[in-house]
Image (cartoon, rainbow, N blue to C red):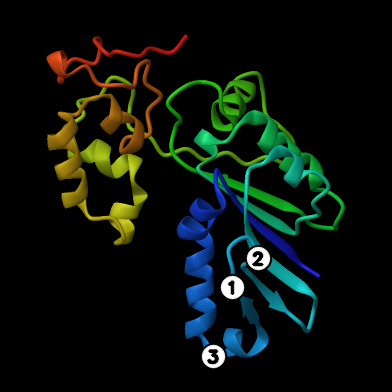
Amino acid sequence: APSVPIIATTVGQAMDSVYNTAASMVAHEPELSRRSIPFTGWGTSRIEVPSNGGKMWPMSNDESGLQGKDPSIAIADEIGFQPISAWSSLRLAAGKRSRSLVLGMGTPGVNHENALYGIRERLALGPIRGLYFREWAADDGCNAADRRQWRKANPAIAAGFLRESALESDYDEWLGGTRFRIFRLGQWVEGYELDPRSANDDTRYALFLR
């Protein structure tokens, strides 16, 4: 009875980012479609596999709702925006099966109060048994216009499902500033909200981390 929750900040985000793609795969692959039963409805959407009692469904990162889950695999999208409490609830729910995998993915957050930053800080003290951490990011202090750094931070470009032209547009809009560095270069930047009076200066932002 595999249990596969898809977790994001909201149910809608969980559906848009991961669940709907999986549902589309099921619908377009005859063998998966034959084995699976999709259910639709806000808050009740899920895919069930009657032959083994498996279920996959989207859910929000509500801490109480994550308690007591028994995932065979759990996918947490945008872990850089997940509260540490939600990630901890999900992690502590695992381990009841012979194999439990919790996968978190996403870009850096806009502050330090999130699960991804907490994990990075903890790893600075030493490895965590059973945890694999992989980060794609541009070099600290790099030129934000350097396309080699774009490709280093975005393996999806080489894989063929992220257009470099999208980064060109984002770079022009944000002049290579903080938003571009966070969301396109994978960098943890001290400051987020752009001050329009100094759009190309990363030292002058209206909101700074504390």
Q: Residues within 10 Å of mark 2 (few under 14, many from 20)?
A: few
Q: Please report contact status of discs 2 and 1: CB closer than 8 Å, yes or no.
A: yes
Percent across and percent down for residue 94 are 79, 48
Q: Is residue 198 left or right of residue 207?
A: left
Name, please, the residue furthest toward the front: 42
Whether 33 is drawn above or below 162: the answer is below
Percent across and percent down for residue 207 are 35, 14
Q: Residues within 10 Å of mark 1 (few under 14, many from 20)?
A: few
Percent across and percent down for residue 177 are 22, 25
Q: In front: mark 1 or mark 3?
A: 1
> Residues under labels 2 and 1: Cα distance?
6 Å
150 or 110: nearer the eye? 110
Give me the disc on residue 40: 1
Q: Earlier in the sequence, mark 1 or mark 3?
A: 3
Q: Label 3 is placed on what type of residue?
A: Pro
Give me the disc on residue 158: none
Residue of label 3: 30
Q: Label 2 is placed on what type of residue?
A: Thr
> Residues under labels 2 and 3: Cα distance?
24 Å
Whether 130 is drawn above or below 188: the answer is below
Q: Label 1 is placed on what type of residue?
A: Thr
